[in-house]
Amino acid sequence: MKTVDLRSDTVTQPTAAMRAAMNAAPLGDDVFGDDPTVNALQQRIAQMLGKEAALFVPSGTQSNLCAIMTHCGRGDEYIVGQFAHTYRWEGGGAAVLGSVQPQPLEHQSDGTLALKDIEAAIKPDDAHFARSRLLALENTLGGKALPMAYTADATALARRRGLATHLDGARLFNAATALGVPAREIAQHFDSVSVCFSKGLGAPIGSALVGTTEFIARAHRWRKMLGGGMRQAGVIAAGALHALEHHVARLADDHALAKRLAEGLQGLPGLTVEAPQTNIVFADLAGPKAATLMPFLKSRGVLATGLYRLRFVTHLDVDAEGVDRAIAAVREHLAA
Ligand SMILES: Cc1ncc(COP(=O)(O)O)c(C=O)c1O
C-alpha cells in the first residue's frame, strides 16, 4: 500500500522530469557568481515577482533571516504576527543572530494583523525603545491567503510610518492561486519577498529572496556569513526553475484536493473542520480518540500531523485516491 503523506508539502519527491532537468543543468561555482543555472533562476524569479534582483538560498529560514538582517540593524525591531514562521518557527534567529528584536502581534481570525495594532506597536523615536524598522507579513499564513486590500493597506501604513516591508511568501504562489492574481501583484506591495521552491512547487531544496539590486547585494553578504554560499548550486536551482515552469498552474489541483478532503471530513463525531482556502486543511478534534488517531492513520498508510488540531497538507504527490483513503481512515477511527 502506497503511503499518503499529508504531513507537509515539503515531502514531495522530485518528478522524473525535474530530475532530468537537474541532471542536464549547466553548472558553475555560485560563490564566484558563475553558475549559469543559479543566475537564470535568480533572473526568472525576480522577473516573475516584478523585482530588480534575487538571491538563491538553501532555505526559507535563511531567506527570511537574510531579509530581516538586511532591513534591520542591531537594536532595531520588526513587527510580526505571533504565529508567523519568522517569529515562532525559526529558532529566534533574528534576535539571536541579528540582534533584531521581534515585536509580535496577535492575529485576527483571517490571519491578518489589525492595522490599529500595527500602528500602536510602532515606537516613537525615544531612547527607551528599540527602533521600529520593518513590518513582516506572511502569505499564506496557516493556509490562509491575506486579502489583497489588506496587503495594500498594511504595507501603505508601514510606508507612511517609515517602515520597510518584508513578505514571507513561502507559499506565495498558493496565495496568488487562491486570490486569482499573478504573484507579482502581491509582491509589488513589499520591499522584499521570500519564496520557497521546496514546498507546494515541489522542488527538493531552495528558496529565493527578491528585492532591489542594492538590497540583494547587501543580503548577499549576510547569506555568505550565514553559510548559505553554495558552489555547484545549479543542480538544485534547475529543480526550482523546472518547478516555476511546470508546477505553478497545477497548485489549483492541490487546492481542489484540500477542499475534497475537508468536505469528506465534515460531520464526523468530535471533528470541526475549517474550510481550506489553499492546500492546508485544519480540523479540531475533541474527545478521547485524539490520542490514538495518528497511530491509527499510520496503520492505514496515511500520515498527517497534530493531536487536537489536525493538519493535512495536499501537494504534488497526493491524488484523489490518496485523499479518499485519508477520509476513509479518519472516518473508520472516529465513527467506530
Ligand atoms: C511560512 C513559512 N516560512 C518559512 C519556512 C521556512 O522554510 P525552510 O523549511 O525552507 O527553512 C516555512 C517552512 O515550513 C514556512 O512554512
Image (spheres, grey):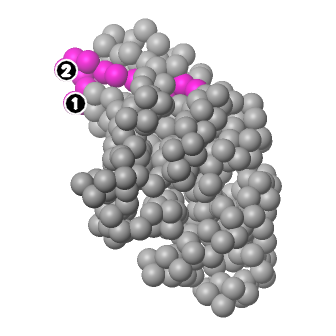
Marks 2 and 1, how far apart in space? 7 Å
Q: Can you say whether 45 is above or below 311 in the image?
A: below
Q: Amino acid at mark 1?
A: Ala
| CB contact under 8 Å: marks 2 and 1 | yes
Task: Check mark 2 vs ligand 1: CB closer than 8 Å? yes or no.
Answer: no
Q: Is residue 292 magenta?
A: yes
Q: Residues within 10 Å of mark 1 (few under 14, many from 20)?
A: few
Answer with the quarter of the image where residue 107 lies: top left
Q: Nearer the viewer, residue 294 or 241?
A: 241
As helix, strand or loop, the secondary structure at mark 2 comes to loop
Residue 336 located left or right of residue 64: left
As helix, strand or loop, the secondary structure at mark 1 comes to helix
Q: Nearer the viewer, residue 167 or 229?
A: 167
The location of residue 237, given as percent across then percent down, is 68, 70
Q: Can you say whether 99 is above or below 87 in the image?
A: below
Q: Can you tell which mark lies on residue 288? A: 2
Q: Which residues are magenta?
A: 276-293
- Most extreme residue toward the left, as rendered? 288
Q: Can you tell which mark lies on residue 291? A: 1
Answer with the quarter of the image where residue 205 lies: bottom right
Task: Check mark 1 vs ligand 1: CB closer than 8 Å? yes or no.
Answer: no
Residue at figure coordinates x 43%, y 28% from the top left: 116
The location of residue 270, given as percent across then percent down, is 31, 13
Residue at figure coordinates x 34%, y 43% from the top left: 104
Q: In this rendering, does residue 111 appear at all?
A: no
Residue at figure coordinates x 45%, y 55% from the top left: 133
Q: Is residue 319 magenta?
A: no
Q: How many marks?
A: 2
Answer with the quarter of the image where residue 72 lies: bottom left
Which quarter of the rendered picture does the C terminus lie within?
Answer: top left
Q: Nearer the viewer, residue 270 or 63?
A: 63
Q: Amino acid at mark 2?
A: Pro
